[in-house]
Image: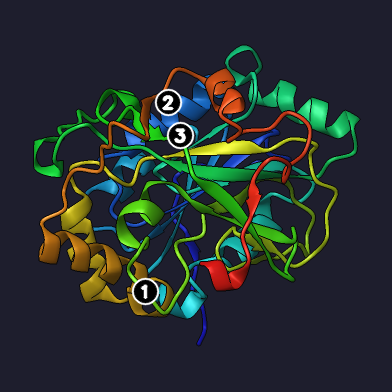
Amino acid sequence: MDHVINYIGNRPIDQPLPDPLAFILVHNEILRLPFLLKYYRDMGVRKFIVLDNDSGDGSRDYLLSQDDVLVFETKNSYAESVCGVIWTNHILDQVCDGRWCVVIDADELLVWPGCECESLPQFTARLEACGARAVVAIMIDFYADRPLEEVTYQPGTHFLSATPWFDRGSYGRVECPAPPGSQFIGGVRERCFWRNRNRKFSPSTISKIPLIKWQKGCRYVLSTHHIAQKLPLAPLRAGLLHFKLLGDFIERCRVEVTRGEHFDGARDYKAYLEVMEAEGLSCFFDEKISVRYTGTEQLVALGILNKTDPFKGLIEIKPQQI
């Protein structure tokens, strides 16, 4: 099908755009957008390119009101765009050629070892100096120490104010043919929704390539989990602090199961909803494995982030073990 993408911003797209950029694909993310934009502004992003996929919750109007946001819109099917990959590659080709770009969802905060003392422009300059063109990151799911129905989040505040806990382990990697050659699994979603459940499909992939120096013709494959080309990788493993598990999680699962727009008919959302509704699971806290976030040095000490190698330190998991 034709993938119709329109620029609907009320500001011209001045070229060249400032480096680094941020690209975000959104559908009904008004709850998270205010803090998300603040976070990346504070990190040094000066322009956001946002593709709105037919939001109906006010996200579109909010984005249009932001002076540093260039808004695109599509009403086409997310599933038929290969979960947004076709749209993402097209827009990055058009406006991000030759630029470093953070490619994230509205619930993802990029971190790397020592980012508390280094801006994103400083980080990308360091990556340039060592010849890197892409950064591998592990997604770390955050949650509260109480049931979802008791989790309240005030828009504009830090996501950690509502969900500051994460799993200290276990995290592993599985070899795969597509660059960068490995994918990561583990954390709370694997623990609560896959472990000991004999599912016929693997746990949610928690590795992405969220920071890349884009060159026209680059191609993401399967969201931002893989790329089609072998690019020089940064000699470290970054992180994506992931805030899917706010108080709206159960209702979002119901919506996505009904829409069926996510991968394989929203199979992961079906798995989440099945467990939460059948077993009454709504609190993901476990006193044996849950730890409260204090910063990137904590993640390095736990072996979740890495200062020297994107794959070092994670247990290799064979496919038959999953």
Give the class, few, some or many, for how many residues have Cα within 10 Å of label 3's Cα (few <14, many ≥20): many
Left-right relation of 300 to 291? right
Kind of residue indicated by mark 3: Arg
Q: Amino acid at mark 1?
A: Asn
The residue closer to the viewer here, 299 or 43, is 299
Q: CA distance from mark 1 to mark 3?
A: 24 Å
Q: How many residues crowd mark 2 within 10 Å: few (<14), some (14–19), many (20+)?
A: some
Q: Is residue 19 left or right of residue 142?
A: right
Residue 307 position within the rendered picture, expressed as x and y whole percent measured from the top left: 73, 28
Name the quadrant containing residue 234. Answer: top right
Note whether residue 230 is visible: yes
With 217 as the anchor, is 315 left or right in this view? left
Which label sits on residue 303?
Answer: none
Label count reads 3
Q: Which residue is mark 1?
A: 198
Q: Report which residue position mark 2 lands on.
A: 38
Residue at screen point 63% across, 55% down = 173
